[in-house]
Amino acid sequence: MELFSVLVLFLVILVFAAVVYFVVRNIGHLVINSIVGLLTLFLVNYLHLMQYAGKPDIDIGWITIIICALAGLPGAILVIVLALFGITL
């Protein structure tokens, strides 16, 4: 039984190390993607691009910021498309 618990602990440590390695290796790409997403959303509101579609500017709240920060540019596009369909976050 003791050998089994040591193996499980070793597997947990190995998975944790793999996740940490992936995050550290790709942190630059994640940060750049988040900045591009937030900048896109800011520019859409700053240039009032939603008014060309007859919609008001996008409300930038905590949920919108979290979506854009986690998903980056695809998240910003998702928020814009949802706003075009009248779904506010």
Image: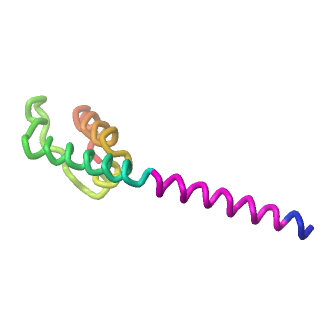
Instruction: In this rendered view, identify the residue nearer to me: 36 or 26.
Output: 26
Name the chief secondary structure element in magenta: helix
Q: Position of residue 28 (x, y in %)?
A: 37, 52
Side of 4 where 73 appears, left or right: left
Would residue 38 be counted in the magenta stretch?
no
Task: Give the residue drawn at x 30%, y 41%.
Answer: 73
26 with respect to 42 (left or right) = right
Q: Which residue is most to the right?
A: 1
Name the quarter where the N terminus is drawn. Answer: bottom right
Tell me the quarter of the picture where residue 20 sits: bottom right
Residue 18 falls within the magenta-colored stretch: yes
In the rendered view, does 7 fall on the left or right side of 51?
right
In the figure, is residue 30 to the left or right of 37? right
Residue 34 at what x, y percent from top left? Answer: 31, 50
In depth, the one of 84 and 16 nearer the eye is 16
Q: Which residue is at the far bottom?
A: 2
What color scheme is it? rainbow
Read off the magenta span. Answer: 5-25
Residue 88 or 64: which is nearer the viewer? Answer: 64
The quarter holding residue 58 reads top left
Residue shown at the point (83%, 67%) measured from the top left: 5
Residue 66 placement (x, y as % from top left): 34, 54
Across and down, in percent, residue 32 comes to 31, 49
Q: Look at the picture and state if 62 lies above or below 29.
A: below
The tally of labels here is 0
